[in-house]
Image (cartoon, grey):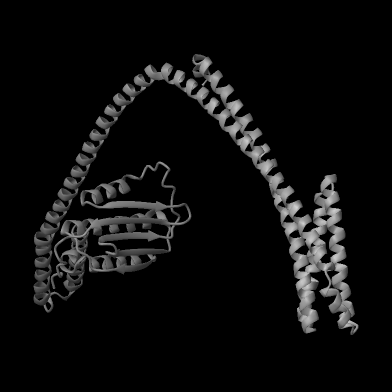
Amino acid sequence: MFRIVKRNRIVFGLASVAAAAMVLISEGSYWRSVGTLDELGSLAQARAHLQLLTHGLLDAETGQRGYLVTGRKEYRAPYDQALQRIGEALVYLERYYGNEPAAAVALKQMRTLTEARLSELELTIRLYEQGKAEAAREIVLSDIGKENMDAIRALGVSMLERETRNVAARRGDLYQTLLLSRAGIAALSLLSLLALYLYLRQTFVLRQQQLELQRMVQVERDRLEEEVIQRTAQLTELTHHLQTAREDERQRLARNLHDDLGALLTSAKLDAARIKSRIASTAPEALELLAHLVGTLNSGIALGRSIIEDLRPSALSNLGLVAALEILAREFATQSGVQVHCELEPVRLQPNAELMVFRLVQEAITNISKYAKAGNVWIRLGSPNAEVEVSVRDDGVGFDTSAQRSSAYGLLGMRYRVTAEGGQLTLASTPGQGTLIRVTLPQSEQPVQEPAA
């Protein structure tokens, strides 16, 4: 900033002077206008109280005549209310005209006439209430009240005209203030434009250099982004290829174990059963060893089945994704003692995507059993928004997702496998509040196939 100011001393000098002058003109105009507006408000209040005084006398006269004609108390209410309004108006006007001798004289005359008129009205009401209605009527029919009201009206009009002249004068002051403010701001705006022109003129070359540098940086950034996109696509394809090769190899091993090892163990078990039937009578002492051999063969067959299920879950192919996840959750709950809550609905996915979902849930609950120390796990599968959504949540210890973790390769592998299937993985975790893994996948256009019986 110091270098910029040093390089443009004249420009910043002019800009500073213009800014300071504009602030001074603006503040001066503002306070002067505020004062004028306050005076206009006071003038408006004075006019309103003058009118209130005149109208109050008329209301008092109307209430007095209505009461004299009808004799009913409710017709006297306007008279009593008018007396209060007249008193308030006189108090305000005396305070307002206290520093204006000429207006104070006129107001004193107005008070005298008003009090005289009110005394006349009060006298007629008192005579009427004393039963002297005829005397009250004679006072009403006399011209004294009319002459008094004419004088009050004339004096009120005169005072209102005076206030109107004051309002016009204050408006003239306000217009003059605004005009001076406009002229000053216009001059300062021209000065500011001159400073801006000088600044733009001096910085034009620098701006061109910056634009060229930005263009070069943008070209390099676009090249790097394109390279990142290519590398990401290659990593995604590689992950998909490795995952496919891995699953194919698992399927081949599972088939070999099932066909070859399973056949061998089953054949050995059948041979042991035949041997047992033949030596049952001739060599009873060998039956115990033979029973141990059969038990060993059964354990081998069970182990082979467990290895085959780990390599390639048969429930996924035979019963479908929902049933396979239910079996996986039930086995995990039995082995770990963790409460597992499932909300599983049939969805439309390709076989590769179904296998990926199964492996993802399997790896997620494996991580929960190793690190989370959770008491409850929630597994959800459904398609609420035209997309397949899979989530695994626990109430374990959680972790800080922004911290660098040495064991984050499992999550990274999950993310690439999901991306390879056209989906998206989101991870949410807070220390002490558990972890949530959510995956969204596009639905398959083909209808859901019923699992084999």
Res. 390 image quadrant: bottom left
Q: Nearer the viewer, residue 96 or 4?
A: 96
Residue 297's image quarter? bottom left
Residue 46 in view (yes/no): no
Q: Which of the two residues, 83 or 448, is positioned nearer the viewer here?
A: 83
In the image, taking residue 87 as reference, residue 201 lies left or right, namely left
Residue at the spot x=87%, y=70% of the render? 120
Q: In this rendered view, identify the residue nearer to me: 138 or 227.
A: 138
Q: How many marks?
A: 0
The quadrant of the rendering that contains the C terminus is bottom left
Residue 57: which quarter of the image? bottom right
Tell me: 37 left or right of 76. left
Q: Can you give x and y, in whole percent of width and height, for residue 28 in the image?
A: 66, 33
Which residue sits at x=59%, y=22%?
17
Q: Inspect this view and state whether residue 224 appears.
A: yes
Camera-nearest residue between 215 and 181: 181
Relative side of 267 to 360, left or right: left
Q: Above or below — where is 258 with respect to 159?
A: below
Across and down, in percent, residue 280 comes to: 13, 77
Above or below, comparing residue 214 to residue 31 in the picture = above
The residue depicted at 35 percent of the width and 19 percent of the height is 209
At 51% from the left and 21% from the top, the residue drawn is 1
Residue 267: % across, % down: 9, 67
Residue 286, position in %: x, y? 17, 71
